[in-house]
Amino acid sequence: MSDVYVIGIDMIKFGRFPDITVPKLGATAANMALDDAGLTIQDMQALYSGNLGQAAAMVGQRILAEIGQTGVPVVNCANACATGATAFREGWMAIKAGVYDMVLCVGTEQMGKGLLGGGGASKGIPTEGLLGSGTMPAVFAEAGMEHARNYGTSFEQFAKVSVKNHHHSTLNPKAMYQIETPLETVMGAEMIAYPNTKLMCSVNVDGAAAAVICSEEKARELGKMDRAVKVRASVMTSDPFQARNMSMPDVNTCTQLAAKQAYEMAGVGPEEIDLVELHDCFATAEILHYGNLGLGKPEEAGRMIDEGETALGGRVPVNVSGGLLSKGHPLGATGIANIYEVSTHLRGEAGQRQVEGARLGLTHVIGLGSACAIHILEKAQ
Amino acid sequence: MPPSDKNPSTSALLPVVDFLKIPEGGDPYLEGSRCSQCGATFLGERSACSSCGAREQLESIRLADQGELYVYSIVHRSFPGIEVPYVSAIVDLEGGGTVKGNLINIDPEPEQIKMGMPVELVFQKAPRKDAEGNEYLTYYFQPKS
Ligand SMILES: [Zn+2]
């Protein structure tokens, strides 16, 4: 089976674009990725499109209507917050299988403002605020409190994640926000669901990201290896059974399982990873994933954030893009946007936020429910 | 506020969720099911076990009315019309089963809420009606007396 390479990748600056249609957002990113590769839509043999909000509305085909209806197969993917990564992985698999040499993967999302989760009851009375909370900030607060219970992690340590990621985003012109948020500001922001304040919740934004991926033979034939990024591992998992599943979503077990498989597939260990873009949908979540991804022992996560090990310049920089907390979280685009971030560092093109000498990077997303996707990427040799 | 006695008259009240059972002339309780193959416990009825995959091996059980607070969040912002703050609690029941519910009769402050603290179930009339005006029986957790 051929290795798979990213030869063109880009994302639009995340923001709020209520007047632009979902297919136009996707088309913009798709054209940027094609331009980055120096190729055209006529060169693509299939399109893998990820979008959640319009999952039943043929977003991939509508993107082609904006950039060129070449008649190629289109697969539309929806997999909660792992939607973009799923679309990328479907493309990866088709090339691995030898069905195609080169395909386009696009992730797109247009979000409203406001709380996610905890929707109304289909019958009877709404149970939100009666039988606890199904809102995402509360669900991830409870997941963080499990870490606090097991390892003594503090509100302040969770808040430091947000300070770090907001700082990183000041170096990323494509992030939604470029604003420093000192610790007092984060901890003093409106409490949404303890211990997550408003500044510890990801930003709902509109966004799109796209990637052109191809076989090794194709990348060499086209002379694209100098900026190419090799996909060393692509892994997806769902939740193995856990006794508390019916009352408490579990983002840990599926991540641990995916990480183990990804490191095995890549033949590398977590200590070799130079940077990580992980699913910081809430500040509490980032702390959990340090241990889940093997970046340190679970009980060390609080110390890692205290000592700046995961900040730019630290031992293993995490979310130097600003993460979902500050770059923003357009659900269907996130999984390809974080592959863009890592690829940009591996290409040495990340400007002010460049992780020096980056050779191997890891991306991670979780769609609650759950779908966990991990990719390990390497600078092409 | 609903009546403060532990088990108010429950006649004519509908259960807030399917796994809350209101027996004729008896005390309400939460129902679970247990897999006779692997011992996994679930809320409500089930025909197959998501732990081991066994089919038709689940028996209905009455879940305990006490347990311990596993984790919680104090919710300060919710959807319009939902009174805040409230404590969303994940409780491990004695003998198996994990249930989410509001933790009441405690100050919604981190200093007051101890993970691992013993809690008990209470059943009360819900402070909401459905569109047809039907009233419901719900459950809450409170610190064990
Ligand atoms: Zn079983």
Image (spheres, coloured by chain):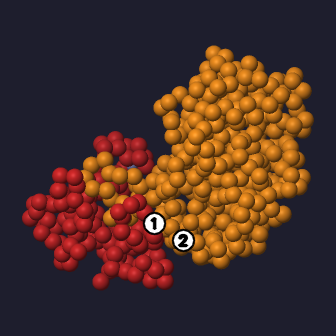
Chain colours: A orange, B red
Q: B21 above or below B87?
A: above
Q: Is residue B65 left or right of residue B72?
A: left
User: Residue A378, located in which quarter of the rendered image?
Assistant: top right
What residue is at 55 percent from the left and 47 percent from the top?
A: A111
Callout 2–callout 1 Cβ contact below 8 Å? yes
Pick the residue in front: A268 or A43. Answer: A43
Disc 2 target residue: A190
Residue A355 visible to an observer of this rendering: no
Q: Position of residue B24 (x, y in %)?
A: 10, 60
Q: Is residue A80 left or right of residue A3?
A: left
Q: Quadrant of the N terminus of chain A?
A: top right
Q: Is residue A311 left or right of residue B55?
A: right
User: Residue B89, located in which quarter of the rendered image?
Assistant: bottom left
What residue is at 33 percent from the left and 64 percent from the top?
A: A130
Query: In what element is the residue under mark 2?
Result: loop
Amino acid found under the numbered disc labelled 2: Glu
Query: In what element is the residue under mark 1?
Result: loop
Q: Which mark is residue B77?
A: 1
Amino acid found under the numbered disc labelled 1: Arg
What residue is at 27 percent from the left and 66 percent from the top?
A: B139
Real-space CA distance between mark 2 and mark 1, rounded to the nearest whole angstrom:
9 Å
